[in-house]
């Protein structure tokens, strides 16, 4: 609650502190009117600082010797608190258009939901054709024993080159490793 009080009178201002406050509020179950308080915080801080100044002017000797908790218990902060509430309420009213329509919990859930989605990209037709060509090269005995590639880099270069030619509609050999790869690639790149 101390953090909430500090935030409401504008002590914690800025993007970093606002993010921390949102997490704190969501974990604590604090419902806020909105989080556009950064726009509201400056006038509210002015009200709080003015209230603290008024307290020091009214009770100059006691204001320096007392802690805020003691002053609150004695009732010396009642007038400044009311003034700060009025200033904050007025600032919230003026900033109404800038305030979001969601609670901090809803905003946090939406951010986590959007960040957690990782959809795999759909493989392009060309990439599927290259995959099919590599499978054909692996199954053949042109690049080593059937089922294994003795030189995968060389095999991939040949498959990629062949798939590119087939994709562009150029002539490709019908015999040997390139012919085998081309037939596999053409099934995908019709």
Image (cartoon, rainbow, N blue to C red):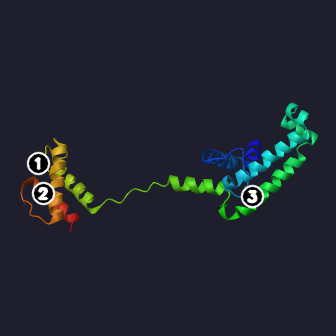
- Look at 17% across and 49% down and name the residue there: 157
Callout 3 secondary element: helix
Callout 1 secondary element: loop
Q: Residues within 10 Å of mark 2 (few under 14, many from 20)?
A: some
Q: Residue 41's x, y, as percent? A: 71, 51
Place residue 151 in its image quadrant: top left
Q: Of tags 1 and 3, which is closer to the observer?
A: 3
Q: Are marks 2 and 1 in contact (CB under 8 Å)?
A: yes
Q: How many marks?
A: 3
Mark 1 to mark 3 CA distance (whole Å): 77 Å
Name the mark on residue 121. none
Q: Are marks 2 and 3 in contact (CB under 8 Å)?
A: no
Which residue is farthest top? 65
Name the mark on residue 142. 1
- Look at 11% across and 64% down and name the residue there: 170
Q: Residue 184's x, y, as percent? A: 18, 60
- Look at 25% across and 60% down and name the residue there: 126
Q: What residue is disc 3 on?
A: 91
Name the mark on residue 180. 2
Q: Of tags 2 and 3, which is closer to the observer?
A: 3
Check the picture and name the quadrant holding the C terminus. bottom left
Callout 2 secondary element: helix
Instruction: Name the N-terminal-most of marks 1 and 3.
Output: 3
């Amino acid at each position: 609650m101390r953090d909430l009080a500090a935030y409401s009178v504008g002590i914690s201002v800025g993007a970093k502190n606002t993010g921390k406050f949102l997490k704190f509020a969501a974990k604590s179950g604090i419902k806020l009117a909105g989080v556009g308080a950064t726009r509201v915080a400056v006038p509210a801080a002015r009200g709080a600082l003015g209230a603290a100044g008024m307290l020091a002017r009214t009770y100059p000797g006691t204001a320096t010797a007392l802690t805020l908790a003691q002053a609150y218990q004695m009732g010396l902060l009642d007038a400044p608190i009311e003034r700060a509430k009025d200033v904050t309420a007025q600032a919230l009213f003026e900033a109404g258009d800038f305030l979001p329509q969601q609670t901090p919990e809803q905003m946090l859930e939406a951010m986590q939901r959007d960040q957690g989605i990782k959809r795999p990209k759909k493989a392009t037709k060309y990439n599927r054709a290259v995959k099919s060509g590599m499978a054909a090269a692996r199954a053949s005995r042109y690049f080593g024993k059937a089922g294994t590639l003795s030189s995968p880099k060389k095999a991939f270069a040949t498959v990629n080159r062949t798939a590119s030619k087939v994709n562009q509609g150029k002539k490709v050999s019908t015999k040997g490793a390139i012919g085998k790869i081309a037939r596999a690639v053409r099934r995908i790149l019709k």
